[in-house]
Amino acid sequence: MTTPPSTDPGRGPNPDRDTNPAPETNPDTAPGPATDTDPGPATTAPYTLGLRLAAACGLLFLLACLVFTGMITLGDAIEGDGSGGVLIAAGFWSLALGAVAGVAALVVPRRALVAAQYCLGAAGPLLALMD
């Protein structure tokens, strides 16, 4: 019983392999810009989950800053003349703008939005303290 000749290019005689030029001179297998069509993985993809988690934690940070700003405002109302100043209002506006930046950072994760969210959140109690 005989076995048929192998069609595997690495085993047995192959007339195509013997007649083809070397791979480095063969234009069909030479690497080059015309054969490289894969752009590769996106460079920003691994960071979107981290930025979204940072933005979600930033919303919790804004909630804590809101409570702290409210405590400062109530303390100022009891100890002071009973009315909030301009800086207290600016502190609450800062927290509101931080919340807008946080939601925007959840939708479109950008480092600048997350940084703005945290900065505006920290500015709320600081502005209320200055009043």
Image (cartoon, rainbow, N blue to C red):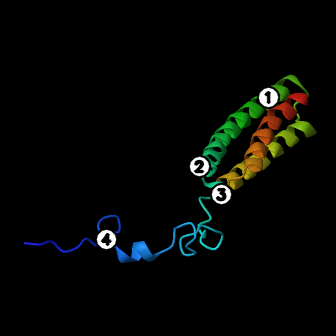
> Residue at point 84% right, 27% down?
76
**For the view shown, which residue lies furthest in the top direction?**
79
Residue shown at 35% from the left, 69% from the top = 9
* Callout 2: SS: helix
Q: Do the residues labelled 1 and 3 touch (CB within 8 Å)?
A: no
Q: What element carries label 4?
A: loop
Residue 91 x/y as whole percent: 84, 39
What x and y, as percent, mark residue 59?
66, 43
Looking at marks 1 and 2 on the same chain, the residue that comes earlier in the sequence is marked by 2
Judge whether 57 appears above or below 112 on screen. above
Q: To which residue does mark 4 refer?
A: 13
Q: Which mark is drawn over residue 72?
A: 1
In whole angstroms, how far apart are the C-alphas of marks 1 and 2?
34 Å
Residue 97 visible in this rendered orientation of the protein: yes
Neighbour class for label 2 at 10 Å: few (<14), some, many (≥20)?
A: few
**Amino acid type, residue under disc 3 in the picture:** Val
Q: Nearer the viewer, residue 76 or 42?
A: 42
4 or 1: tag closer to the N-terminus: 4
Name the residue beneath numbered marker 2. 49
Q: Nearer the viewer, mark 1 or mark 3?
A: 3
In three-dimensional space, the C-alpha distance between marks 3 and 2, rounded to whole angstroms, equals 11 Å
Question: Which numbered disc flags the more N-terminal residue, 3 or 4?
Answer: 4
**In the depicted view, which residue is nearer to us: 11 or 96?**
11
The quadrant holding residue 34 is bottom right
Q: Position of residue 8 (x, y in %)?
A: 31, 69
